Image (cartoon, rainbow, N blue to C red):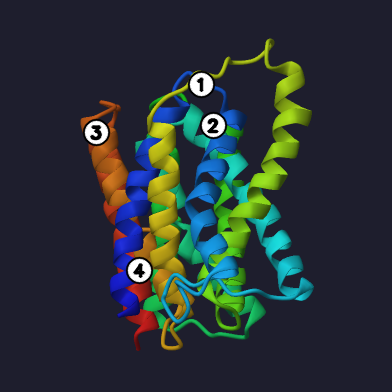
Amino acid sequence: MWLGFALVSALFLGLYDVSKKQSLKDNAVIPVLWFNTLFCSLLMLPFTLLSWKTGVLDGSIFYVPTAGWELHRLLMLKAFIVLGSWIFGYFGMKHLPITLFGPINATRPIIVLLGGLLLFGERLNLYQWIGVIIAVISFYLLSLSGKKEGISFSRNKWVFCVIMATLLGAVSALFDKYLLSRFNNMFVQAWSNFYQLALMTVILFTLWWPTRKKTTPFQWKWPIVFIAVFLTLADYAYFVSLAQSASMVSIVSMIRRSSVIVSFLCGALLFHEKNLKSKVIDLLLVLLGLFFLLIGSLQ
């Protein structure tokens, strides 16, 4: 069951990336991200209020329980980590082709796996080491594909942003497994969104608003709404998957990264991006690396 939820999450995550790319084209990053957190919070607000004020959702999968300050403090920390990943990721997504962004971001499960190795004393088997090696090779080939478009992996700040987003996203995935093994998934999702909105509101009015006339102007685009819708659906399926006792965060993370297939196809069909032949080889290597990691994790 948890594998099925992970696959559903991957589908919506791919559509989320496409909506994000469309929304960020010639647009200001910070307000787009703020609207994302706003709409995600609005989608979760009715479940929270109904759970708090009525008994309508009692015992259902949409019930949002209450919790003490200890958990709220952890969710504030999660909000900082997630927003850091999003801010880096949004800027990287805006300035890089989605057919390059997606495969780089798809290396996140490697970091999650290595995080398990360093933090939880896990050991890699032969298949997992093969997956890691293939992923490293694919990352090198992606850098060669980037050079064909004038993008240097060692000197391009937007590549650095994507790498930082990937690292923070991996940290968030490991933290999610810790949280969801102890707390209700609806509570984690709802209150994470509320704290992210609060933090983004501070960032919006302290960093973007004073300089808004000197930077890329903000323009409303309807895909901004779909960012929140697809992200909320992807996160719900993801949290339900991780909340099940049999789930493995490394496998869930790998399956979710298959969302790169959706974003890559849309990058080719909708955005008509360049050098697709070489990037297809890079993408296939990324997926092959994820396959070996999956096989190794199921041993």
In primary-sequence order, the first of circles 3 and 4 is 4
Residue at image coords 72%, 22%:
209
The mark that comes first in sequence, 1 or 2, is 1
Q: Quadrant of residue 241?
A: bottom left
In front of the other: 293 or 247: 247
Q: CA distance from mark 2 to mark 4?
A: 26 Å
Can residue 103 be seen from the camera position used here? Answer: no
Q: Amino acid at mark 3?
A: Ala
The answer to whether the residues at label 1 and label 2 have Cβ atoms under 8 Å apart is yes
Q: Is residue 95 above or below residue 154?
A: above
The quadrant in which the N terminus is found is: bottom left
How busy is the neighbourhood of tag 4: few (under 14 within 10 Å), some, or many (20 plus)?
Answer: many
Q: Quadrant of residue 173?
A: bottom right
Looking at the picture, which amino acid does disc 4 mark? Ala
Residue on which the image places disc 2 = 32
Instruction: For label 1, count other residues whose C-alpha is less than 10 Å away and answer few (under 14), some (14-19) or many (20+).
Output: some
Tell me the CA gap for discs 4 and 1: 31 Å
Q: Position of residue 186 (x, y in %)?
A: 51, 69
Which residue in the structure is indicated by mark 4? 6
Q: Which mark is residue 27?
A: 1
Which residue sits at x=65%, y=15%?
215
Residue tagged 3:
268
Q: Residue furthest front?
A: 54
Q: Amino acid at mark 1?
A: Asn
Tag 3–tag 4 contact (CB < 8 Å): no
Q: Tell me if 10 is positioned left or right of 212 in this view.
A: left
Of mark 3 and mark 2, the one earlier in the sequence is 2
The answer to whether 224 is drawn above or below residue 54 in the figure is above
Question: Alpha carbon of mark 1 to alpha carbon of mark 2: how far?
Answer: 8 Å
